Amino acid sequence: MMKKLKLQSNSSTLLYIQILKITVLVILYALLVTLKLSAQSLSVSIDVKKDTSIHPLNIGDRIPDKLWNTVLPVMHDPQQKEHIQLKDLQAKKLIIIDFWATWCAPCIASIKKLQIIEKKYADRFALIPVTYEKLDLLQRQMAKLSFHPFSVYSDPQLLQYFPHRSIPHQVWIMDNKVVHIGAAVDANEKNIALALDGHLPQMEVKAEFMDFSLTKPLDEFARRINIPIYKKSVVTGYIKGIGGNNGIMQAKGQKLLYYNNAWVMSMLAYATDMPLNRIWIDTVKRSNTSFINQQGCYQLITPEATPDDQMKAWFLDDLEASFNCHVNKKTREMQVIKIVKLGISPASKLEKLQYRIDLKSLLALLNTNFKWKVDLPIYTTDLALRTVLYANESIPKLTKDKVRLAEFLKRNGLTLSHTVESLEMLVVNPNNESKQ
């Protein structure tokens, strides 16, 4: 009996030791995880922390040694470098630092153009695209865009030297100093060739209001550069330096509806929840209005509890009053392009293709336009909107090409049919010639 008790006691002791060991290991693991997480948080705070010794540079300022020696992370470097310094390119006659982002179509178009120019003048000209976006996001987005430029990424420092609110934002450097800060419009081969020959052309300096806030009255910024103000509530002309954006937001106990630097026709579409290709102006009346090709800004500040629909209704009232027109929704017989079944079975093994989209999303792509113009095509269908279609190339790209679109639909057993349908349209009636 005593021997049995002793064995039980030894077993209990061993079990206790095992439990103690496991407990210690768990505590140590928890400490390691905590330390690891703390290091990640510290790393993030260091990445975003501003360098108080950096002062913004303007046209005419010399490039400080600190900037020439700043180590910058890069991707797709021709020499497979992971980091560069501006001093590596200091011997070039002209350097253009080009701030961009993957979501900015004008930025990408400008970089592609400048890359071609850079190859032609490679011995004297260097292009340095710069983005604040992180590497993992860039890689995902560029895979979709089929665009893989050499670029500085995750930039916290160049942005401090050259602060800006909108992109493209391009800084020209010659003879160790800033000689121009502009948008993409002047970054062409003619101007670059002149600069390389020692004749810097006259170019428009890019306006940047770094104190701009969505909660400030737009008329304050319009007055600074003598932009006309159409209405105090507030409708203005195009304001350079504040970028383009729109939406409804809440701030400081108020609600704001804002739509900045957009076509007036796009504002009408937003205020009425109608796509641009469903806006109709009588053929005769089109010659009696100037706002079709006008751009402007709008800001409405209301109590926080104001419903979105009410804000859009006020927005529409302001647009009608400011641009001397009247709009209403009416059913009209319209020419449409209808997606219908082809009458033959779709190609086999479509599911193995890389790209896919449902019919609802495809219609949204086809009916989306950047700017209103006469007789924008209207796409419709009676087929199930959940129908999935397959393609072997990027679908947004092929929707821009009628031949490739037809081939894509045919492969999926569909085709386009031109017909007439009764559709709800936004009918715009100009009262008379706009005075704006």
Image (cartoon, rainbow, N blue to C red):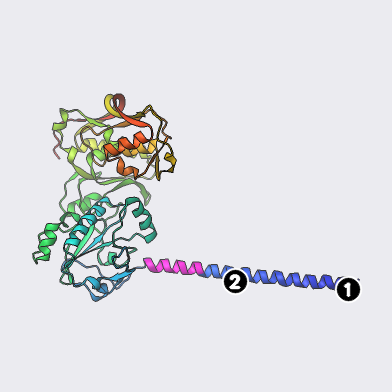
At x 16%, y 67%, the residue is 124
> Where residue 379 is drawn, which disc sits there?
none
Q: How would you rate the neighbour count of disc 1 (Cα within 10 Å): few for under 14, some for 14-19, many for 20 or more?
A: few
- Magenta stretch contains residue 45: yes
Q: Is residue 165 left or right of residue 44?
A: left
Against 297, residue 33 (above or below) is below
- Between discs 2 and 1, the one toward the N terminus: 1
- Confirm whether the magenta stretch covers residue 409: no
352 on left or right of 61: right
Q: Residue at x 29, y 25 (%)?
A: 419
Instruction: Tell me, for residue 28, which label it has, or none.
Output: 2
The numbered mark at residue 3 is 1
Residue 43, relative to residue 276: is it above or below?
Answer: below
Q: Which residues are magenta?
A: 36-47
Mark closer to the observer (2, 1): 1
Q: Position of residue 266 (x, y in %)?
A: 26, 40
The residue most toward the right is 1
**Three-letter amino acid code of the residue under disc 2:** Leu
Q: Is residue 396 above or below residue 39?
A: above
Give coordinates of residue 335: x percent, y percent.
26, 27
Direction bottom: furthest residue: 65
- Distance from Cα at disc 2 to Cα at disc 1: 38 Å
Q: Are marks 2 and 1 in contact (CB under 8 Å)?
A: no
> What type is the residue that disc 1 sits on?
Lys
Residue 235 visible here: no
The picture quadrant where one finds residue 152 is bottom left
